[in-house]
Amino acid sequence: AQTVTQSQPEMSVQEAETVTLSCTYDTSESDYYLFWYKQPPSRQMILVIRQEAYKQQNATENRFSVNFQKAAKSFSLKISDSQLGDAAMYFCAYRSGNYGQNFVFGPGTRLSVLP
Amino acid sequence: NAGVTQTPKFQVLKTGQSMTLQCAQDMNHEYMSWYRQDPGMGLRLIHYSVGAGITDQGEVPNGYNVSRSTTEDFPLRLLSAAPSQTSVYFCASSYSDRGYSYNSPLHFGNGTRLTVT
């Protein structure tokens, strides 16, 4: 079974600075997809960014980018120019490319943004 | 766009009571799922469905039942509530084509905070 690990339960960053959230996963599959979700205090789950395992190029979405290291099974999220609205819980998630494709979520990293 | 509609937002039950959490989506998604979120444990899959009439167990299915009679609806039933079922519950759906979803993300409802006393 696949597992997702986020080794940083909590992190903080100064407003306008850059922060990187770590995520590692364990799988024997070659076809899979990786996601980062954000959960602000409103409890809503918001997709931040996604990456296909077959793509070597790292995904970017505005201030958010990933460092995808397939051999190391690492999928870190970099937030540039941090804003107060980035304060949230961040979840890394793995989705198999096989039939059924259930998501496996990491335990989350709580990010605080300091003014 | 309604997306995924989940009700109720909050619920308090006494031990032994039963209830149904409702979930409906209007995006014609084949794949639907229920998760529970507990502190420090992320989201854990309870049950999922890859299409109408097809359901299967996830990581933590005990104490919960589901059914999928239509593409739109995927209710979660708590048979006899226990304090261990105190949690936040999320319904989520995604695009799926004959069981394969590729890079389609999960679309989440707004969650239900359930307290069992």
Image: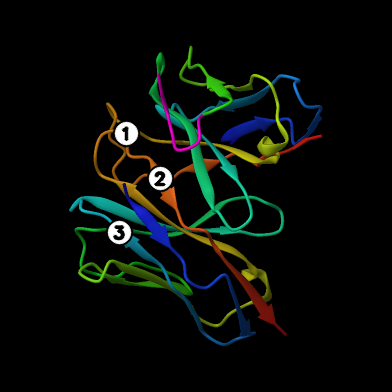
- Point out the frontmost of discs 2 and 3: 3
Point out the stretch of residues depicted in magenta.
B55-61
- Determine the residue positioned at 37% across, 40% down: A102
Report the residue marked by disc 1.
A100
Q: Quadrant of residue A115?
A: bottom right
Q: Tag 3, which secondary structure?
A: strand
Chain to which the residue tagged by mark 3 belongs: A
Whether residue A12 is situated above or below residue B75 in the rendered picture: below
Q: Quadrant of residue B54?
A: top left
Q: Tag 2, which secondary structure?
A: strand
Q: Tag 1, which secondary structure?
A: loop
- Point out the frontmost of discs 1 and 3: 3
- Of residues A4 and B70, the one nearer the viewer is A4
Kindly identify which numbered label has been placed on residue A103: 2
Amino acid type, mark 3: Asp
- Determine the residue positioned at 39% across, 72% down: A76
Amino acid type, mark 2: Phe
Query: Residue B102: image x %, image y %?
Result: 28, 43
- Reading the chain from its start, which is encountered first: label 2 or label 3? 3
